[in-house]
Structures are given as structure tokens and as C-alpha cells.
Amino acid sequence: MISENNFHLGLLYLIHLLINADGIVNEHEKQALLRVKNKEKIPQPTFDEFLDEVKTKKPKEIYERGIDLINGCEDALKLRAFALLYKISEADGSVHVKEVRLLLYSVKMAEIEFNDVVAEAGKLHNY
């Protein structure tokens, strides 16, 4: 249960940073966040905790917390998190250079191969 909660919160923190990376959060990105919440079965209390924390934390703190939480997960969940982030980066129809930079750096910090992320993302539908 702890690992699943870490996965959920870490994923939400990193999604938040990803959709804010270009300085514009559009409706497609907001909807993608809600689809992830629903498809990954993120409990409402966890989602509420996430919403409360991102209001008060600086981006660096959000990033560090998100990476720490994801790194505390088993490899399969880490890979899933980055595959979901990859899919979200495409949600608005274009991938901004800051989104790519965040994704590549985060994958490196989690010691995951980017090619594995792309392959896993290809298996995900409707995100």
C-alpha cells in the first residue's frame, strides 16, 4: 500500500511539473491529469493531498519529492510512471523543449532507460 501511495503521489507531482513546464496548462493537459487519476485509481484523499501540497511548495521541492517517491517504488512502477509522463507530454499536441528536458533528466535520476519508457508508453492507450 505504501508503494502504491508513493507511486500515486510521485506521479502526480511529476505530472504537475510536466504540464506546467512550458508555462501554459491547457485543457487537454488538465483532462490528461484527471484521466490518469481515474485510470490509475488514485484515491481522492491522495489527490487532495497532492493539490494542497503543490499550492505551497516550490517547483524544486515538488520535483525532489516526486523523484524520491518514484525512486521508492519497484522498477515496474517506476517504468509505468515515466511511460505515463511520456504520454502526458504529448497531451497538448506538441512537446515543449522544457517538457523533454524534465522527462529526460527525471528518467536519468530514476536510472531507467529512455528506450524502455518509449516502449512502455507505446503499450498505453487513451491517456
Image (cartoon, rainbow, N blue to C red):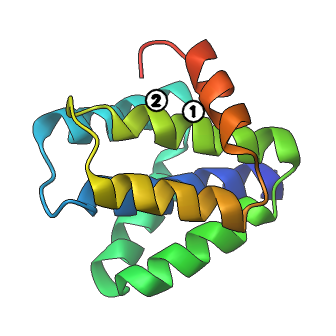
Position of residue 104 in the picture relative to residue 62 (left or right): right
Picture quadrant where residue 22 is located: bottom left
Alpha carbon of mark 2 to alpha carbon of mark 1: how far?
A: 5 Å
58 relative to 17, above or below: below
- Figure quadrant of the C terminus: top left
Residue farthest toward the right in the current orientation of the protein: 74
The disc label shown at residue 115, or none: none
The reply to whether discs 2 and 1 touch (Cβ–Cβ < 8 Å) is yes
Q: Is residue 104 visible?
A: yes
Residue at 55%, 56% (x, y): give it: 104
Q: Position of residue 7 (x, y in %)?
A: 68, 52
How many marks on residues? Answer: 2
Q: Is residue 112 above or below residue 38?
A: below
| Residue closer to the observer: 59 or 109 | 109
Q: Residue at x 44, y 85 (%)?
A: 60
x then y, percent, for residue 8: 60, 50
Residue 107: quarter of image: bottom right
Instruction: Using the rendered image of the protein, determine whether residue 9 is visible from the camera's viewpoint.
Output: no
Q: Residues within 10 Å of mark 2 (few under 14, many from 20)?
A: few
Residue 27: name its quadrant.
Answer: top left
Q: Amino acid at mark 1?
A: Lys
Q: Which residue in the structure is indicated by mark 2?
A: 38
Could you classify mark 1 by the number of other residues whose Cα lies within 10 Å: few (under 14), some (14-19), or many (20 or more)?
few
Residue 66, above or below 47: below
Q: Which residue is mark 1?
A: 41
Compared to residue 1, the image places residue 6 above or below, namely below
- The percent coordinates of residue 11 (x first, y second) are 55, 52
Label 2 secondary element: helix
Disc 1 secondary structure class: loop
Name the kind of residue labelled 2 in the image. Asn
